[in-house]
Every structure is written in C-alpha cells, then in structure tokens.
C-alpha cells in the first residue's frame, strides 16, 4: 500500500501512522453534551467501501492527511492535507 | 448419531459407509421464536445454549455464507483466561470452564489442548505488571505461575536469550491456557444445536431488519422474509453493517488481522508463546504447522487479507525471538475482519430496539470467548437480563465512562 503525500509524493505505507476516521476533525464544542463527545470518540459508520480517515506522515513531512480510501480493495483514492482548508 | 471411539472402529470396519451428515439443511420457515444473524462461533453457540439452557428450539441461525466461513475458521485458536479487569476476568474464567467440559457436552472432539500459555516479559516494570496480572488470575480462581528467566529457559530452551533489545526476564505461565481446533468448534456447536431442533440456514444473507413502533418484528433475507419477535445480531466483523440495518451506529471500527502457518514439522513447540513486545505469538498445530501472528494492520479494513509490511514485521519478530524457525517455509497467510471497540472489550446487550440484541466487539480475542458468549447471549435473549458474567459488557458503557480498557491504551479503536 502506498499513499501519495501532497508534499512528499508516493510513499510506502510504513511511513504513515493511521489515527482513525476523519470524524475526529469535527470536534464537539468543549461544553457540548456528553452524548456528542461519546459519539465523537466512540461511534463509527464503519462502512465497507469508501471511507475518509486521518493519517500522519510521521516519517516524512509530519503533515496530518485526510485520505479517501476503499476499505474493501485497499485502493487509495485521494490524499489531502488537513491544514490549509482542504479538510 | 452419537460419536464414540467404538463407532469410529465399527465404521472403519464397514467402509465408513454409515456416517450421516452432521446437520440438516432446512429451508427457512416463515416464522421463528428467535433468529440469530451470523453462523460463526458466537451465533452457533448462542443457538445451542438457547436450546439447551432455555428450551427455546423454534429458532434459526441465518448465515450468509457457509457455517464457519468467517473468523471462527480464521483465527489462531488460542484459548485462555488471563484477564485482569473485573468484568473481563469472570467472563473468560467462565468461558474456560465451559471449554473444559465442551467435548463431553457437545459429543464432539474440538481438540481442546491445555498445553500452557507463556507471556514473556522483558523489563522490571513488565515483570511487576505480569505478577499483578497473575495475582488477579489466581484471585479469580484460575491458574498462573510467574517464571523467572531460568524457569522460561527450562520450558523454552530454543528462544534467543542473548537478545539485548528485549532480554527475556521471565514469563507468566497460564497452565490451563492452550488451543483448540477452530473449525471443530463451529461444527460441534452446529451439530449439537441441530440435534436440539435449531434450523441452521446457510447462504441466507440478512438484508434488512424489520422494526415496527420500536420493536423488532423480523428480518429480510436473500431467502425471503422471516418473522421473529427476538433477533440476535452476532455478525463479528460485519456487526456495524448489520446494526446499520436497524438504524444503529456502533462503537466499532473493523480492522484486518493476519495470521500465518508453515509447512508441517515434527513437534518442536509444546506451548503457546506470546512475545507481546515484538507483536508476535506462536503455537504448533496438531498437524505440525507453526501457527503464528502479530498485530492488526492498523487501518480500517474489510479485506480478508492484509499488506506486506505487517507480514515482514511478524516474520522479523519471530526470527528475533526464536531464530530456529528461520528455515521453516510459510505455507499460507490470510486475514480476518476484527470488530474493534474503543476499549478492546466486547458488547453483549440489549439495544434501544425492543427484541433486538447485540453480541459484538470481539476484537482479536473472540475465539476463546465463544462458549461464554453464547451462554450469556442466550441468557440475555431468553430472560431479558444480562448474565452475571457478562454484566459489564453493556452497550452504553462508552457513554457512561464504565470502560473495560484491559490494555489501558485509550479510546482509539485500533490500539487494543
Ligand atoms: C487472524 C486471526 C487470529 C485470531 N486469533 C485468535 C485467537 O488466537 N484467540 C481468540 O480467542 N480469538 C482469535 N481471533 C478472534 C476470533 O476469531 C473472533 O473474535 C471470533 O471468531 C468472532 O466471532 P465469530 O466466530 O462469531 O465470527 P465469524 O465466524 O466471523 O461469524 C460471523 C458470521 O456472521 C456472518 N454474517 C455477517 N453478516 C451477515 C448477514 N448480513 N447475514 C447473515 N450472516 C452474516 C458471517 O458470514 C460470519 O460467518 C482471531 C481472529 C483472526 C482474524
Ligand atoms: Zn509527507
């Protein structure tokens, strides 16, 4: 599996750290109801097919990346930086 | 037909012509008292205990493929009760006791082998943690022996004791831990459930869950609609999708876990050995193959195969621990889909929909749990109450903060 980092180009999967679903970006407000935090931290759509998730280019440019992938075929569709509004 | 040594001999004398199929292949009825979605280990065990312990026999197991086509036939077969946290500890202890009587109960040889499981440790801090875990196991009534380095060397002389990165300080031996034949567990439960009247319906994918006024009324399947007042969702890695049919969103992310087996060798590894620091564990099957594995591939996946980096990592860890296996050739590798929860512990509970029950979130440790999970899920479906050994596996524990984070790694699904 290779991910094409927008800054570094195509790189081996081993350079990246997988964090989880891109929903982690939609952080509830600090004073949001506990249900919102529970949902944010724990519950997932968990689809078989296209997903968006967060990867960190740990052994490269250290960018956080939003990756669109297929969980059935392992195909990587797009890789965008989280910073800079692309998210 | 009862199985026995005598029958094996007489069948052998008469050309093995008298064996019958181990279970029927019925067409689905229009209505059952209860249906179970998923014919893996947990679904089949649930059906068996519903029939045996609660007298519910007008029930069906609906399996989209063939019985045992999921993780029940893909795991590395380790059976153990070495948990630490109250909640997990009594559950896995109960499961191990059921394992110990399982073959007599099912009249089926599941090849349960209590060969002893050894968890290695490599630092003073890890030794303290394992000593504490061993004490928790003893308090639970199970067995644990803390071995020092020489104690490990006596049992496992072939490990590399010169490793400087992860020097072997000792190990926690769980003598009643071991392995079982995974397929046989599915087949044994299937046959025993069928004998008590349970319909096992294969090639029957559930495609919808019918709900009227907050109550479950049945399911839609590729073999037609089936009415039932009680429905159990027991779909392991596919739990998220099955639950979505009922409009539920689960605290589960599905991940792929790989495993490997070598060509058959003469007996060389007598125990189950776990090298947690290297993400590697190994045992030898009765056929002689070295069966081993490591960690998840770490990214969400529904592919029943993994990627090469984890293959390399597992091989490296194996060579680090026991260089003697380097000449063995790997025959096969495969992957299975793990239903990972944010605390690494399972869910056996009611859902907000009346009559709809959930048994899921088995992470990478659901094989050893099969007997107790079926037992507790059957109890829940029959009585509406959680069985005491599974009382802490509630679906809302994530909302209330009553987590069972055995590894203490936080709420990220893939870190358990
Ligand atoms: C490589 C690997 C190694 C493992 N090693 C161990 C180990 O050493 N020890 C241990 O304790 N555990 C281990 N596990 C974990 C264990 O195998 C699983 O936790 C356990 O088998 C899951 O429960 P199950 O047997 O019911 O799952 P499954 O056998 O996967 O059963 C679920 C069934 O549901 C069916 N299904 C799904 N959706 C539908 C639908 N819509 N309609 C009808 N049917 C449906 C599937 O086809 C499947 O047959 C391992 C797993 C893997 C992959
Ligand atoms: Zn980069």
Image: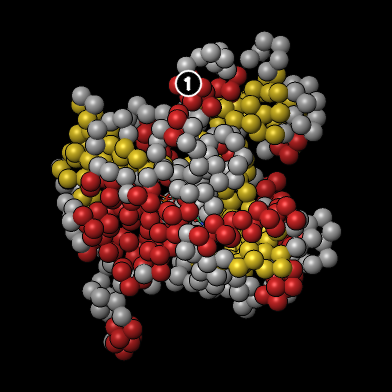
- Residue B154, percent across and down? 70, 76
Residue at position x 43%, y 51% from top?
B70
Residue B99 shows in this picture: yes
Residue at position x 25%, y 75% from top?
B2
Q: Is residue B388 above or below residue B299?
A: below
Is the CB of the residue bearing disc 1 within 8 angstroms of ligand 1?
no
Q: Is residue A75 above or below residue B314?
A: above
Residue B87 is left or right of residue B353, and the answer is right
- Residue B174, percent across and down? 56, 66
Assess disc 1: are there few (<14), some (14-19) or many (≥20) residues with their C-alpha within 10 Å of its C-alpha. few
- Residue B360, percent across and down? 41, 43
Residue at position x 74%, y 29% from top?
A57
* Picture quarter with the C terminus of chain B: top right
Q: Residue B227 falls in which quadrant of the image?
A: top left
* Picture quarter with the N terminus of chain B: bottom left
Q: Nearer the viewer, residue A15 or B127?
A: B127
Q: Residue B12 falls in which quadrant of the image?
A: bottom left
Residue B96 is left or right of residue B326, and the answer is left
Q: Is residue A64 above or below residue B53?
A: above
SS for dot 1: helix
Farthest top residue?
Answer: A85
Residue B147 is left or right of residue B247, and the answer is right
Residue at position x 78%, y 67% from top?
B160
Q: Nearer the viewer, residue B353 or B390?
A: B390
Q: Nearer the viewer, residue A82 or B142?
A: B142
- Residue B334, percent across and down? 56, 53
Q: Is residue B336 above or below residue A63?
A: below
**Residue holding disc 1:** A34
């Amino acid at each position: 599996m290779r991910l094409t980092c927008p800054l570094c180009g195509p790189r081996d999967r081993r350079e990246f750290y997988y964090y989880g679903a891109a929903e982690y970006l939609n952080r509830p407000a600090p004073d949001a109801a506990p249900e919102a935090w529970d949902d944010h931290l724990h519950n997932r759509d968990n689809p078989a097919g296209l997903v968006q998730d967060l990867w960190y280019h740990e052994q490269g440019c250290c960018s956080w990346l939003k990756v669109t992938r297929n969980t059935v075929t392992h195909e990587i569709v797009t890789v965008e930086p989280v910073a800079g509004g692309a998210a | 037909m009862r199985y026995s040594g005598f029958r094996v001999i007489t069948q052998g004398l008469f050309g093995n012509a008298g064996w019958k199929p181990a279970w029927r292949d019925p067409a689905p009825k229009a209505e059952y008292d209860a249906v179970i979605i998923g014919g893996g280990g947990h679904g089949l065990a649930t059906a068996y205990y519903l029939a045996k312990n609660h007298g519910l026999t007008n029930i069906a197991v609906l399996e989209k493929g063939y019985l045992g086509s999921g993780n029940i036939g893909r795991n590395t077969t380790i059976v153990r009760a070495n948990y630490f946290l109250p909640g997990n500890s009594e559950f896995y202890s109960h499961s191990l006791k059921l394992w110990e009587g399982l073959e007599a109960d099912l009249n089926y040889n599941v090849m349960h082998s209590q060969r002893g499981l050894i968890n290695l440790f490599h630092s003073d801090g890890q030794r303290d943690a394992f000593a504490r875990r061993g004490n928790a196991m003893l308090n639970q009534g199970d067995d644990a022996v803390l071995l020092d380095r020489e104690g490990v060397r006596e049992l496992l002389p072939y490990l590399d004791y010169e490793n400087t990165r992860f020097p072997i300080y000792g190990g926690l031996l769980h003598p009643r831990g071991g392995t079982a034949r995974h397929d046989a567990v599915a087949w044994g439960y299937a046959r025993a459930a069928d004998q008590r009247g349970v319909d096992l319906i294969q090639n029957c994918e559930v495609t919808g869950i019918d709900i009227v006024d907050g109550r479950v009324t049945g399911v839609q399947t590729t073999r037609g609609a089936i009415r039932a007042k009680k429905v159990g969702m027991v779909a392991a890695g596919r739990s998220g999708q099955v639950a979505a049919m009922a409009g539920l969103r689960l605290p589960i992310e599905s991940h792929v876990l790989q495993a490997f087996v070598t060509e058959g060798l003469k007996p060389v590894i007598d125990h189950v050995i776990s090298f947690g620091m290297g993400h590697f564990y190994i045992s030898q099957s009765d056929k002689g193959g070295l069966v081993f594995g490591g960690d998840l591939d770490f990214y969400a996946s529904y592919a029943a195969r993994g990627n090469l980096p984890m293959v390399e990592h597992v091989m490296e860890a194996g060579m680090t621990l026991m260089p003697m296996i380097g000449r063995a050739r790997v025959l096969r590798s495969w992957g299975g889909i793990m239903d990972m929860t944010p605390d690494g512990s399972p869910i056996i509970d009611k859902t907000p929909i009346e009559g709809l029950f959930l048994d899921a979130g088995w992470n990478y440790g659901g094989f050893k749990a099969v007997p107790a999970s079926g037992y507790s899920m059957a109890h829940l479906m029959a009585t509406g109450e959680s069985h005491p050994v599974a009382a802490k596996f509630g679906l809302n524990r994530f909302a209330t903060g009553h987590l069972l984070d055995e590894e203490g790694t936080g709420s990220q699904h893939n870190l358990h």
